[in-house]
Image (spheres, rainbow, N blue to C red):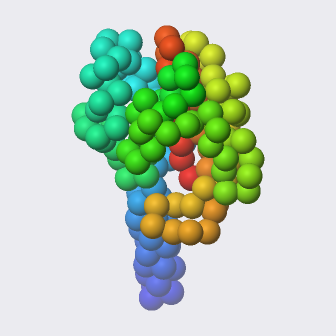
Amino acid sequence: MRRELAVVSTLAVFGFAGTAWSAEFGTPGEAKAMLEKAVAAVKADKAKALGMFAKGEGGFKDRDLYPYCGGPDGNFTAHPTLLGKSLKDLKDKTGKPLGADVYAAASEGAFAEVAYMWPRPGQTEPVQKVAYVTKVGDQVCAVGYYK
């Protein structure tokens, strides 16, 4: 009986620890859902949506998840810190042409995935990150999650 209780207790601790860790970061499903919500917002009112994305308002900032967009000129039209800078010329931490890959993968009405290396918020060591990308009118939008 004691041994069974110890096993159950150990499993519960590891189970809750795993849940707490995973809850700290967004999941692929949550990233995709946020991009779907972002697409709907851009279609409804592009200017309002881009402003909300940049400010993280309206549910468009959840832990490490947020939408970002770039316009036809290749510059960020929505991003928490890179607004107005070039998305198209952005490279990941290994030199991969992240922005060019995002633009190349984006197509209206479909989601594509672009993998790259980027540090988690508050860290410096790059880790694998994946962005779901799509095109909405003249905007290329994405939401990335860490693997």
Q: In which quadrant is the N terminus drawn?
A: bottom left
* Residue 86 seen in the figure: yes
- Could you say which is closer to the camera, residue 94 or residue 112? 94
Please name the residue shown 63% across and 22% down the image: 106
Residue 89: x, y in percent?
A: 64, 38
Query: In the figure, 77 relative to 55: above or below?
Result: above
Residue 99: name its quadrant: top right
Query: In the figure, 42 relative to 7: above or below?
Result: above
Q: How many marks?
A: 0
Please name the residue shown 38% across and 53% down the image: 63
Residue 52: x, y in percent?
A: 29, 32
Please name the residue shown 42% across and 39% down the image: 83
Residue 76: x, y in percent?
A: 48, 33
- Could you say which is closer to the camera, residue 18 or residue 43? 43
Q: Which residue lies most toward the bottom here?
A: 2
Residue 104: name its quadrant: top right
In the picture provided, is 34 more to the left or to the right than 129? left
In the picture provided, is 51 more to the left or to the right than 64? left
